[in-house]
Amino acid sequence: MSIKLKIIFISISIASCGGGTLESYGALAVNYKTGAAYLTARHDNESAAYQQALYGCGDGCSVVEQFKDSGQCMAVSRGTNLILGWKQGSVQKKIETESISQCSKNGGVSCIMFLSFCN
């Protein structure tokens, strides 16, 4: 059996520095049939993060998670059978481990963490 995996990129939009606190938005889009996933972060608004996640993931994808604010992280794991698991939180190493567990709970085989990023 051969499995085709889509190459995934993480998109980062860097906001200009200035006074005050800047909100930062991210989104995760997935395709359950192909196992494709695209994680985007550090966008100036929710709509930009949402659209970039859909565009990057491709046809058949939908946004399954959105997150905002500095310090928020998202981790995504995938099994060899293309089952996905993901977690969101503020401690990157913790959610990476939890995403692997979630992938396994979802029925994933030999799950590994493959996307992880923080705003």
Image (tube, rainbow, N blue to C red):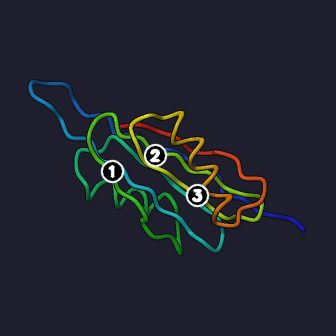
Q: Residue at x 66, y 55 (%)?
A: 78
Q: Residue furthest left?
A: 19
Image location (x, y in percent) of residue 59: 53, 72
Q: Which corner quadrant holds the C terminus? A: top left
Image location (x, y in percent) of residue 108: 71, 62
Q: Secondary structure at mark 2?
A: strand
Please tell me how crowded label 1 is: few (under 14), some (14-19), or many (20+) other residues with Cα within 10 Å: many
Q: Residue at x 71, y 59 (%)?
A: 5
- Disc 1 marks which residue? 67
Q: Is residue 35 left or right of residue 69?
A: right
Select label 1 or label 3 by which is in front: 3
Look at label 1 and name its amino acid: Phe
Look at label 3 and name its amino acid: Gly
Q: Earlier in the sequence, mark 1 or mark 3?
A: 1
Please tell me how crowded label 3 is: few (under 14), some (14-19), or many (20+) other residues with Cα within 10 Å: many
Q: Is residue 37 left or right of residue 80?
A: left
Q: Which mark is residue 106?
A: none
Q: Is residue 69 above or below residue 18?
A: below
- Disc 2 marks which residue? 74
Q: Is residue 18 left or right of residue 104?
A: left
Q: Secondary structure at mark 3?
A: strand
Q: Is residue 115 left or right of residue 26?
A: right
Image location (x, y in percent) of residue 1: 90, 68
Q: Separation of disc 1 and disc 3 at Cα?
A: 16 Å
Q: Residue furthest right?
A: 1
Do tag 1 and tag 3 residues touch (Cβ < 8 Å)? no
Do tag 2 and tag 1 residues touch (Cβ < 8 Å)? yes
- Disc 3 marks which residue? 85
Q: Earlier in the sequence, mark 2 or mark 3?
A: 2
